[in-house]
Amino acid sequence: MAGGDGTTTTLRRAFAVAPALARGLGLTLALAVAGTALQVVVPVTVQQIIDTELLASGGVDTTGVLMRGGVALAAVVLAAFARRTSLARLARSAATGLSDLRVTVFDHLHRLSALHVQGERRGALVARVTSDIETMQAFMEWGGVGLILGTAQVLLAMAVMVIYRWQLAVVVFVGVVIYAVMLIWFQRILRAAHDRVRRRVADSMAAIGEATSGLATVRAFGMEQATLAKVRGRLEDQFRAEYSTAALGAALFSSAEVFSGVLTAGVVAVGIGYGPAWGMSAGVLVAFLFLVNLLVEPVQMLVETVNQAQSAGAGLRKVLGVLDVAIDVPDPLDGDELPDGALDLSVVDVRFRYGDGPEVLHGVTVDIPAGRRVAVVGETGSGKTTFAKLLTRLMDPTSGSILVGGRPIETVRFASLRSRVAYVPQEGFLFAGTVADNVRYGRPEATDDEIAGAFALLDLGGWIDTLPVGIHTEVGERGSNLSAGERQLVALARAAIADPDLLVLDEATSAVDPALEVGLRNAIERLSDGRTSVTIAHRLSTAEAADEVLVFADGRLVERGPHGELVVAGGVYAALYRDWEGATSTGSRSRRGDLRP
């Protein structure tokens, strides 16, 4: 991963984030260097055998040859052991460290606000945790040790060359410097190419993930060919990026073969031409050629490793890029606990904007006493759902303050906030597993009896009995075995098992089949009973039953009060109610009657 801006800093950051990567690295390096140093014994022994034993004036000394050969063999065996041990240690450190890094990145993603995660492509985020780290692991386990061993071997070979004959060492050094300069220049091209590959991989994973998640919609609108063309286009972009990068890597590897041949030929030519004048023996020249081979071999390996290193470097930069994203909704670990009992809400001059976009909430101020059931209504884009997410601190307001139970919401520890405040989104997300598994997200230690009791509390015991194996029925990936309404029933039970004191509901009855709508409304009523509740109402029948109605328009709280008073007042709410009544009476839904966020 040499070359390019900030390589050392990037590696230091990786070691800081995943300390296991560097654990025991000193001993690993020592073993690698020892193994390389022992390899140098071979050319030294060969020189001594040729000059002292084979070309001795008294004839060949067989005993001396065998003794020196035995020393060389022992050195080779010890070198292999040291190098193999260093390889195993580095592989173990890489596997452990990168596993820690994967967990760290995943944890960081879960600590980011819903706003940031929603703004990113799901496939790209998955690529950060999976394929990007996999490229790093492949390099660390194999290329990393090659980089360490190769560098040590090159330096030791050069040092011994200088001791043997500095004139020939200069020839080798000049060749190495020229090739190194070329490598540095080429690495910049490779780095850009591998960065491009990682982007294309993220693009293709995002396209495939989107197409898979939206399979039903794709089929419903006959968009199979268009979707296939989009996915094929992303995959072709990835293929072209990978192919061009592989071609660059192949060219670089071929250059190592040329470098090896030219360097060896240069040493032989200079050694034969000027060796006698320098008093260089045949043994020294042969030993020097062994040293050249000892140097060229790791150079070829290093060249191949450079390509792998650039891919790993690109993945590491992408992963660290995720960790660079500031946690915009931090957990105050030493913060407050919510007081016992029912919770009230106080919203003071709250404003909010998404990123650099226009303000979507403008100075909202409202007090909601403990135990009150409040409905929030308004047309699409009026700010209802944004308001709900701020109340549960899925996002923080741009300005203003929100108090829960008299505590500023940003000072309340997440453990306390999440255990006392429940949010049920419009589309209840279910994880692969059983109904019981999904309900336990509300309280992990809940027993089967308690889960069944939560459904009974919501008057949903009859529905559970219709499932093949009750609460142990598999829901499928993303709850695909259940209907939209059934998924919402499970989400309500998940909230009920948590027994929250403040409930924020993004009501989802508009997409529910009529057979479940009554049960769903009844469950919501039972869940809200005795709790402070804020319900985003898409149908005004919910607002009719609320203690108070908050009416939003264009990001402002324009009216508030009981349903009856607002209807009589003849304002925004009254107009919405007339539209809704008209749509209900004709069995259709007008644009203004469907009050989606």
Image (tube, rainbow, N blue to C red):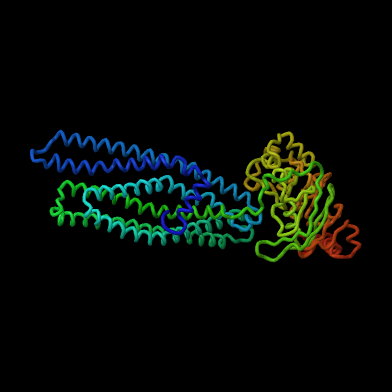
Which residue is most to the left?
58
Is residue 123 at all visible to an observer of this figure? Answer: no
Q: Observer-nearest residue: 28 or 522?
A: 28
Residue drawn at (27%, 43%), measured in percent from left and top? Answer: 40
Q: Is residue 522 left or right of residue 328?
A: right
**Quarter holding residue 590:** bottom right
Q: Is residue 286 visible?
A: yes
Q: Position of residue 576 (x, y in %)?
A: 83, 63
**Image quadrant containing the C terminus:** bottom right
User: Whole-percent x and y of residue 275?
Assistant: 15, 53
* Residue 214 quadrant: bottom right
Q: Residue at x 67, y 65 (%)?
A: 357
Give left or right: position of 218 versus 254: right
378 sits left or right of 153 in the view: right
Relative to the observer, which residue lies in front, 551 or 220? 551
Give the x, y percent position of residue 20.
Answer: 49, 42
Foreground residue among 258 and 525: 258
User: Residue placed at 50% from the left, 45% from the top?
Assistant: 98
Is 557 above or below relative to 100?
A: below
Residue in the picture at 59% in, 49% down: 108
In the image, residue 408 lies at what x, y percent? 75, 51
User: Which of the 4 image quadrants contains residue 468?
Assistant: top right
